[in-house]
Amino acid sequence: MSAGHVSTTLATLHRMANDIARNLAAMGHDKAVLATADHIDHFWDPRMKAAIFADDLSALLPIAREAIQHLAGGAHPEPQTRATEFNAVDEVGHSDAG
Amino acid sequence: MGFERQADFGTPEVQSGEMVSLTIDGRDVSVPKGTSVMRAAAEIGGSIPKLCATDNMAAFGSCRLCLVEIEGARGTPASCTTPVAPGMKVKTQTPRLEKLRKGVMELYISDHPLDCLTCSANNDCELQDQAAAVGLRDVRYGYEGDNHLGLRTDTSNPYFDFDPSKCIVCSRCVRACDEVQGTFALTIDGRGFASKVSAGQAADNFLGSECVSCGACVQACPTATLQEKSVKAIGKPERSVVTTCAYCGVGCTFRAEMRGEQLVRMVPWKDGKANRGHSCVKGRFAYGYANHKDRILNPMIRESIDQPWREVSWDEAISYTANKINDLKAKHGARALGGITSSRCTNEETFLVQKLIRATFGSNNTDTCARVCHSPTGYGLKTTFGTSAGTQDFDSVMDADVIMVIGANPTDAHPVFASRMKRRLRQGAKLIVVDPRRIDLVRSPHIEAQQHLPLRPGTNVAVMTSLAHVIVTEGLADEKFIRERCDWDEYQDWAQFVSDERHSPEFLEAVTGVPAQDLREAARLYATGGNGAIYYGLGVTEHSQGSSTVMAIANLAMCTGNIGRRGVGVNPLRGQNNVQGSCDMGSFPHELPGYRHISDVAVRQLFENDWGVTLDPEPGLRIPNMFDAAIDGTFKVLYVQGEDILQSDPNTKHVSAGLEAMELVIVHDLFLNETANYAHVFLPGSTFLEKDGTFTNAERRIQPVRKVMDPANGYADWEITQLLANALGANWSYTHPSQIVDEIARLTPSFAGLSWDDLLVRGSVQWPVNEKHPDGSPIMHVEGFASGKGKFVVTEYIPTDEKTGPRFPLLLTTGRILSQYNVGAQTRRTGNVAWHPEDLLEMHPTDADNRGLKSGDWARLASRTGETTLKVLVTDRVAPGVVYTTFHHPATQANVVTTEFSDWATNCPEYKVTAVQIMPSNGPSEWQQDYTELSERSRRIAVEAEPAE
């Protein structure tokens, strides 16, 4: 794994986290932090989370930065939007068919 | 099923609550008011002779063969144009009628070639049948007079011939083109004896005309005048199988008509609930790829991608692959392995691939093409409505009063549904088109959009919010609906947001490029014009704010009460045939089948107990992140079934770098596609004609796919996945896809009521199908939203980071064309190349002039990620500053220039907005030259040396 490649992937993760934060910002800062954390928790692969947890986070917007710090501390937020509410084992109704 | 024509009732079915009773040939019959006498007779098994009548178009009354006698009525009226009346007494067979019909038929036959024995339609010709039915034995007029027998055959269309010498000018083809397809390409030229069917002007042939080759005219023709070339070449079909088309998300039902093991033709099935007997050029004719010489039938392996392929037995291929996977898993861990399910394969095959990845590979690194098309639909509709799915069935459009088409081009990408939509528009429904291009729907025969909002690419959210601004600030919102069905407090927050002056059409006009007054008119029309239905496509989703636009669309539908009944709704027009199904089957890396998150212990336990494995509780990688991880060295193995990610995914260089970094790429496909250039194992796939299973279309309709012939490669795709799984230690023992259906039903509550045998009886069913909805669910959210209240979401417009500037001053947007499908792997290997042999770059005359370019010139198309060359088509379909191309041809590789920017929520690529520069060119780019060389080198197949004698 070359340093160049690491920075490319980290740049992608920065962009992804910042994009999520910017688009959830309309919820208000505190809710947006939780919603960003919730989104990343539900949709990111462990190696992506580990990579951004290990980063200095200086490239992140405040909402994204706080969200990552929240997750890095071991938190697993409750669903903040319906996008992260999934069917229970015997439930029908939720679908995120793309 | 043997070969016989599908029953034809002569005139369309009439829907009426009022029944009318009458007597036909002494038999009582009761039919809906408005039904024709011809249809009423057919309903009780009668068969009034006919030639110009057929039940998928309005009665015409021209052939004069269907005359009947009605007690108390004067003359002998045509039964096709005569509606039933209470107490009517009809006679369909009398000496008088026999004489009249025989006389009419005699005139037809006097100007028709008497070559029945050598005619391709022999024994499958309505003219022949009707001549027999009326008892014609002789033609008194002779054949020496003026006639049309010397007219030349037009063979220009790749799929059918037009032989005017056999034409009886019944106008069925013309009417089919008008009423069924809605293209109005055909006409009757001339008058009286000189009348003849013509495709456009006198000098036009079928290929050069406006004809879109949907096949409706061929299907309608009662003679061999319009005849499939395949019937001429192979002969009359002798058996048939009803199955489902494997092209777009409409999911048309076809009858595959066979002679021996040869497919003679695909004929649209009138009982198909998605297509109602219609077809397009792809489904009807473009199946030749199944037998194309490029198709690979033997498994192949190689150690590295610079080596030639080596053909091996199935045993060797599977064992080689399994050993490699085991080694790499032992070395790098399960999370270094993953796969991509195919939205072109069946639900059962997709289910097995994600099961292979989760249960056998041991990771959740499974994703599907929905990632790059409609994943924002999933996020957006789930967030607002509580569940993501098209809310309507296709029939619903016939009750729409205002149709808003956003970022979709149905006449090219979903042509059979577009014909239904056009029919409704011709009946008077109003049309709003929101699209940067002037798509055909904006203005075509008998259709003109009331509003075309030609927005600047990337400003969808601004336009949607602006529409909401008008609706809310002008008091057009449906407060009763909102109070009953949505969260009122959230609505008020949202209403306050959209009402802000910064969201007004006037304020945003400079951003969106949409004239404020046009936008206001469009908003008023949608909000007040009756049933408002929204249909949208990838022009909505493939943006950095794709998910936000979907939510903004849902907001519009909720605030106007356009949800939960026929004629309204929010309808994503899905791209591939089974993209809905591939999502339903658990293809996404974060969830198991049934949209249940992988982190849920109870959910995992259900599958773990059934499958006898332990599942990884963490989400896996999405497709673009797989490439990043591969480049980083943490992702090593990729199994790709039925997708060509190198050609279809954005930033080709990034994709190829990712693939090149992997140690084992397994491509399971029909052809050595572009992805296979980077593969180490090639497993030959089977076509949709070669297997049983199910597809789920854009209206959630699960439909059977039936095996028509044996797999040329030896195995159906589900069998190949099973071979690999078992070589990796699984103990699967499926002997038919019906058993996989049972497993899906057992493990997935929304499919609990599904069974293969039941599906074959029903023909199709729309999920959810379970105890609460035993007959499926045609319309969603009828009594309430799936998960409580509808949720209004504030969607702030955030401009994309992909910006034009001095280096890249133009915006590129990409899309599809009618004759080609997706990456073109199938359609490029059919006669469809006659219409689209290469990708073209559409440019506005001003932009072309500024660069000294004219149509047909080569141009260099460059973005910050790469460059390619292609020919220019100068057209005012695109606005100044916007250019457009398709991505069907690997020689062009439009995705060399698209970027890695993506939707914020789902990482769906931003295909629709790329800043580019264009300049004259005299040849392929360096990348194209290198890629061509790589491609040729990579496709080499080693020839085994013959043993010495």
Image: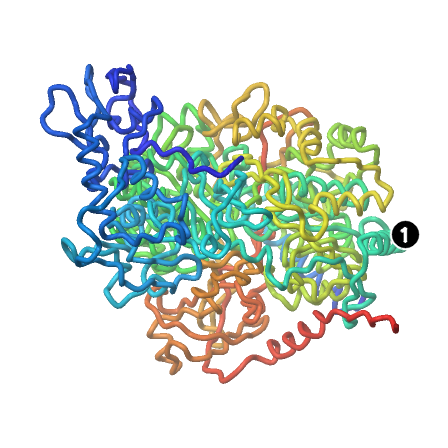
Q: Which amino acid does label 1 sit on?
A: Ala
Q: Residue at the bottom extreme?
A: B922
Residue B6 at x, y = what percent? 42, 36
In the image, B405: left or right of B788?
Answer: left
In the image, B888: left or right of B668?
Answer: left
Residue B617, compared with residue B83, is above or below; it is below
Q: Which colour scheme is used?
A: rainbow
In the image, B393: left or right of B520?
Answer: right
Residue B697 at x, y = what percent? 52, 40
The residue carrying mark 1 is B330
In the image, B567: left or right of B388?
Answer: left
Residue B867, compared with residue B112, is above or below; it is below
**Label 1's element?**
helix
Q: Nearer the viewer, residue B73 or B681?
A: B73
Residue B661 falls in which quadrant of the image? Answer: bottom right
Residue depicted at 41% across the width and 40% down the height: B277
Q: Residue at the left extreme?
A: B74
Residue depicted at 67% across the width and 24% down the height: A90
Residue A83 at x, y = what percent? 59, 38
Q: Is residue B343 visible?
A: no
Label 1: few (<14), some (14–19) or many (≥20) C-alpha neighbours in 10 Å: few
Q: Mark 1 lies on which chain?
A: B
Q: Quadrant of the C terminus of chain B?
A: bottom right
Q: Which of B526 and B238 is in front in this view?
A: B238
Residue B97, compared with residue B552, is above or below; it is above
Residue depicted at 63% across the width and 38% down the height: B693
Residue A61 falls in which quadrant of the image? Answer: bottom right
Residue B421, compared with residue B13, is above or below; it is below
